[in-house]
């Protein structure tokens, strides 16, 4: 047997002072009675029953209180199996981890703000299957499809800029890998959320978008950065800025938010485009995701312990009723 609220059992300690109080009151009543009536005259004068009835009624009260406390602790034994349908969307986050995402036109950097956005959106979800793909010139799965939001957030926050040999931005690689995560999908509601500054050097995204349209994938695009642009920092081993990226002429390269490309991708895939200035500014996207019709993703069978609090509660009520029904008046039997 287990208890749902075992801490409630500490209330049983209240029975000790209650019992002491009962004994004290009994002696106090006997003392007051002795001041008015002699012990020898008590059987003829007093109409109350003997001391046994007092102790018996008090024992009933103590037992009723004990069972009330046991009922409050919710005893449980036995178990039953219940199946629960998990309904939700399937969402893939595509996070740009190229060097341009280190730009600091959003503080502390575009990438850090983007990661905060991902965790903010996931924190507003309930039973949706989420996964994340990080991409630059190549793409890799940062987190496979999961319903464990705590684990997902840890992996999302651990996203780091892609290494030097993988620099560049290729939307098509991210879309292709994200699409593969839907391979075993049981839902017709599939969503991708592309988070990037929009600079795609490979320009292979039009063909990728056609495949997304065939698969009826909705894409929401979130632009990270300023339209005016910002220099791309070069980070050292300690993560600090050691310089700025320059072109062949020695001029500092600026990374600008390409809103036109992102807006077109979103429009072609039945989604919407948002510019990210803060996590609060993405509230409309969260509302849209919540408004989607959820479909069954999986079925979960779990065991649930059976509550048995009704038994001690019934005993407590019966004991209390017995205590109230007992009279402390002496019963005199009349001879016929």
Image (cartoon, grey):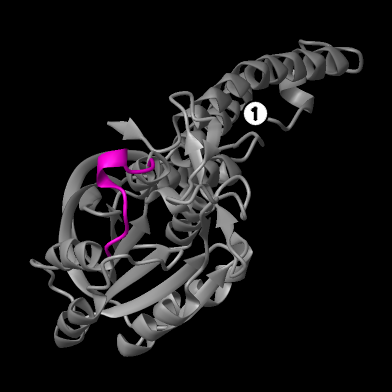
Q: How many marks?
A: 1
Q: Residue at x 61, y 16 (%)?
A: 16
Q: Is residue 166 magenta?
A: yes
Identify the element where label 1 is drawn.
loop
Q: Which residues are magenta?
A: 160-170
Quadrant, the N terminus: top left
Q: Nearer the viewer, residue 133 or 147?
A: 133
* Image position of 213 (left or right of 246): left
The image quadrant that residue 78 belongs to is top left
Residue farthest left in this picture: 184
Locate residue 328 relative to residue 309 in the image: left or right. right
How far across and how far down the image is residue 7, in percent?
50, 28
| Residue at x-position 45% and y-position 34% | 70
Residue 257 visible here: yes
**Badge 1: few (under 14), some or many (20 or more) residues near its Cα, within 10 Å?**
some
Q: Position of residue 284 (x, y in %)?
A: 55, 77
**For residue 251, side relative to residue 98 (left or right):** right
Residue at image location 31% in from the left, 32% down from the top: 2
Name which residue lies at 51% across and 47% down.
250
Residue 324 lies in the magenta stretch: no
The residue identified by callout 1 is 49
């Amino acid at each position: 047997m287990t208890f749902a609220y075992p801490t409630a059992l500490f209330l049983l300690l209240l029975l000790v002072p209650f019992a002491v109080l009962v004994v004290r009151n009994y002696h106090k009543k006997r003392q007051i009675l002795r001041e008015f009536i002699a012990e020898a005259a008590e059987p003829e004068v007093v109409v109350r029953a003997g001391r046994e009835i007092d102790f018996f009624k008090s024992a009933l009260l103590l037992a009723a209180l004990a069972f009330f406390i046991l009922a409050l602790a919710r005893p449980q034994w036995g178990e039953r199996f219940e199946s629960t349908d998990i309904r939700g969307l399937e969402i893939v986050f595509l996070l740009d981890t190229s060097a341009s995402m280190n730009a600091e036109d959003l503080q502390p950097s575009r990438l850090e703000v983007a990661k905060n956005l991902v965790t903010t959106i996931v924190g507003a979800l309930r039973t949706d299957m989420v996964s994340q793909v990080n991409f630059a010139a190549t793409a890799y799965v940062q987190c496979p499809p999961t319903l464990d939001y705590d684990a997902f957030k840890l992996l999302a926050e651990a996203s780091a800029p892609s290494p030097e040999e993988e620099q560049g931005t290729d939307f098509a690689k991210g879309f292709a890998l994200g699409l593969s995560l839907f391979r075993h999908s049981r839902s017709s509601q599939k969503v991708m959320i592309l988070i990037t500054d929009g600079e795609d050097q490979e320009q292979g995204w039009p063909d990728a978008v056609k495949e997304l349209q065939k698969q009826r994938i909705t894409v929401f695009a979130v632009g990270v950065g300023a339209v005016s642009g910002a220099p791309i920092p070069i980070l050292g081993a300690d993560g600090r800025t050691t310089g700025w990226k320059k072109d062949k002429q020695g001029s500092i390269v600026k990374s600008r938010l390409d809103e036109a490309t992102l807006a077109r991708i979103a429009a072609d895939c039945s989604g919407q485009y948002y510019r990210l200035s803060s996590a609060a500014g993405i509230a409309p996207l969260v509302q849209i995701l919540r408004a989607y019709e959820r479909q069954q993703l999986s079925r979960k069978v779990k065991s649930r312990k059976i509550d048995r609090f009704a038994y001690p509660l019934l005993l407590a009520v019966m004991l209390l009723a017995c205590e109230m029904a007992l009279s402390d008046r002496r019963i005199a039997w009349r001879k016929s």
